[in-house]
Amino acid sequence: MAKTREYYSDLSYRPSLTQLGDVKTVVNASAIKQSIDTIIYTVPGSRLFEPTFGVGIERYLFEEFSPATGQIIGKAIETGLSKYETRIALQSVEVSLMEADLSYNISVQYIVIDTQTPDSIQVRLVRS
């Protein structure tokens, strides 16, 4: 019996309706990317029944701008994604410092486990 490919879906963060009046959803790769984004930006303690959920990346905005802080950010993302996004196999988290505008460019490389498809997401953390 062949294993059927799993189909992921979630409600879109940008609420809108389809032509039939249903709430639009994001599916497959987009649903996983939205989940990763949620984990990275959610502040731990903000979910009542999951107090450790999330990375809360924005809390690092006003830490010392340094390679050490970049390493801390990378490790926090690795830990959060490993714990809360079980549909992926994390390959790497790279944090680059952009001194011109005091920002961090973050690249997360992963493989979707069910399809063995490599994918990535980019995040930019900027002091403004």
Image (cartoon, grey):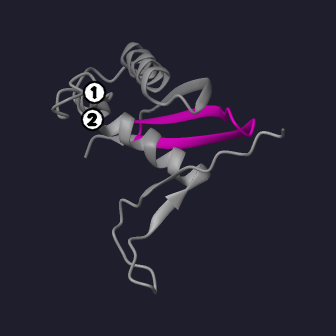
Which image quarter: residue 108?
Answer: top right
Q: Quick one: SS at disc 1? A: helix
Instruction: Find disc 1 in the rendering and name its residue.
Output: 60
Residue 44 lies left or right of residue 122; in this view the side is left
Q: Nearer the viewer, residue 64 or 82?
A: 82
Q: Nearer the viewer, residue 17 or 40?
A: 17
The stretch in magenta equals: 100-124
| Residue 113 spot, x, y in % from top left | 67, 32
Q: Quarter of the image for the N terminus: give it.
A: top right
- Total count of labels: 2
Q: Residue at x 55, y 25 (%)?
A: 93
| Residue 30 spot, x, y in % from top left | 55, 54
Q: Nearer the viewer, residue 47 or 5?
A: 5
Which image quarter: residue 56?
Answer: top left
| Residue 82 spot, x, y in % from top left | 49, 21
Tell me whether circle 2 and circle 1 mark residues in contact (CB < 8 Å): yes
On the question of residue 120 being in view, the answer is: yes
Q: Please, which residue is most extreme toward the top here?
A: 68
Q: Is residue 65 magenta?
A: no
Q: Residue at x 27, y 35 (%)?
A: 58
Instruction: Find disc 2 in the rendering and name its residue.
Output: 58
Q: Residue at x 65, y 45 (%)?
A: 6
| 26 versus 85 height, above or below | below
Q: Quick one: SS at disc 2? A: helix
On the question of residue 102 being in view, the answer is: no
Residue 48 lies left or right of residue 38; in this view the side is left
